[in-house]
Image (spheres, helix red, strand yellow):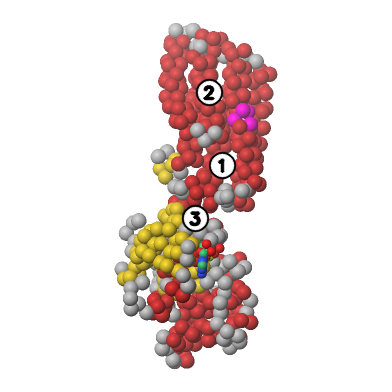
Amino acid sequence: MRNTFEHKLGKLNNDLIRMGGMIEEAIASAITALRDNNNELAQSVVDNDIRVDDAEKSIESQCLSIILREQPVARDLRKVSAALKMVTDMERIADNAADIAEISLIADVSAIMHIVKEIQVMSEKVIHMVSGAVDAFVRTDITLAKTIIEDDDEVDELFISIRNKIVDLIKSESCSGEVAVDALMIVKYLERIADHAVNVCEWVEFFETGEYKNTQII
Amino acid sequence: MENENVKISTKNVNLYYGENHALKDINLDIKTNRITAFIGPSGCGKSTYLKSLNRMNDLVPGCRITGSFLLDGEDIYADGVDTNVLRRRIGMVFQKPNPFPMSIYDNVAYGPRVHGIKSKAKLDRIVEESLIGAAVFDEVKDRLHKSALSLSGGQQQRVCIARAIAVQPEVILMDEPTSALDPVSTLKIEELMNTIKDKYTVAIVTHNMQQAARISDYTAFFLVGEMVEYGKTDDIFSRPKDKRTEDYITGRFG
Ligand SMILES: Nc1ncnc2c1ncn2[C@@H]1O[C@H](COP(=O)(O)OP(=O)(O)OP(=O)(O)O)[C@@H](O)[C@H]1O
Ligand SMILES: [Mg+2]
């Protein structure tokens, strides 16, 4: 048995779980900061982004070291290369959460968050997708990965309906153009985060089957 | 598998050393001009299989072989097959270097001489080309007439490879040919295999997974006398079908 190797893979898993926790928290905090117009919380999301970047670098460096020293094959190779690809998506998720927090720092959109309740609903859905995607990877749960990929349709629908609501608000002059644009950007970021969660799930499928987006790439 | 020609076809092969059932119903086609690697734990029958291809097991008392072995469609075990001719067509390099107790030159010239080449110039050329091909010429060129036994293990092995290619076989069987070689000589031999595969069909046993992955086109995984999985090397090392293959190549075996 390769105890050292198993240990390295275990650490990689743990670090991915930890990074997953960090990005879920970043999204949740960014949304709470918006709702409560809490600048302190928003600032912490922006500040914490560097920790996510560090986690990404550490995971990348672990993967490269495993490739160099352990020369993984088969399942191990697929696992390490999937991890290497998916941390990029995880890091982008944190960037998008920081982008949302930055909007919160420069504008007070709490009012529109209360009027358009679906933004909260959408954010919860997105967080659920992100945590599910990371879980699917660490537990190698391809069924879960597929469910998450399907969830993206709901997020896309929410995006359209929220967008229409915002347009209505502008038409009825119920909110300022500035706030409306900010709100639209926020939901666009959320929609992007869901896409990155889908990407992570596609790497889970690759890990299990060697297929990425229905193409055998290994 | 794709439209590649089959050099050696083996079907329903069973081999017994007395009571020991060493090969169990092996079905495997070795492709022409391809490198086929045989991997598996010690004692699983890799060497036995390789040796059965050029009838080296005929000499083992108590050894019983059934099944069909076809070289270019012709039965290797048919009555009247001259094993000397067979072994010229299917050459072998063994696990342990086994130079003949004679000079380096004579080792390499041995086969060509047996096959009737007498011209000194021609023999000189064959010896030099074979030694170059086996990546050992520079190290031995000044002592060609010294005993091959005076060489280091790695050098002896490369002289044995030179001896095998000197007769221009159609198939070269190599049983862990680089296990005693340093990394540089190993890479030279691997390069050699790559360059000669246009002319030869190579079957190689190796315990080095990276080597199998680097050099071979096809890989067969053996386990206690059975062939568990056989397929394109890229597939075996990225998506093996059988869990036992996966466990073995990822080092989780046993
Ligand atoms: N000449 C022989 N006489 C009797 N039994 C033999 C002989 N050669 C091999 N065997 C037996 O046949 C089985 C397969 O041996 P073989 O040498 O083919 O294994 P292998 O896969 O080449 O192992 P290794 O990786 O250690 O070289 C073993 O159980 C071995 O003990
Ligand atoms: Mg052997």
- Vertical arrangement, residue A175 with respect to residue A151, above or below: above
C-beta proximity under 8 Å, tags 2 and 3: no
> Is A170 left or right of A76, judged from the image as shown?
left
- Helix, strand or loop status at disc 2: helix
* Crowd around label 1: few <14 · some 14–19 · many ≥20 (10 Å): many
Dominant secondary structure of the residues highlighted in magenta in the image:
helix
Q: Which residue is mark 1?
A: A84
- Alpha carbon of mark 3 to alpha carbon of mark 1: how far? 33 Å
Highlighted magenta segment, given as a residue range: A18-22
Viewer-side label of 3, 1: 3
- Alpha carbon of mark 2 to alpha carbon of mark 1: how far? 22 Å
- Vertical arrangement, residue A154 with respect to residue B191, above or below: above
Residue at x 63% of width, y 76% of height: B152
Query: Which amino acid is tagged 2?
Result: His
Q: Position of residue A61 (x, y in %)?
A: 63, 44
Q: Which residue is mark 3?
A: B223
- Vertical arrangement, residue B223 with respect to residue A98, above or below: below
Q: Which chain is mark 1 on?
A: A
> Is A120 left or right of B11, judged from the image as shown?
right
Q: Which residue is mark 2?
A: A128
Residue at x 60% of width, y 44% of height: A63
Query: Which amino acid is tagged 3?
Result: Leu
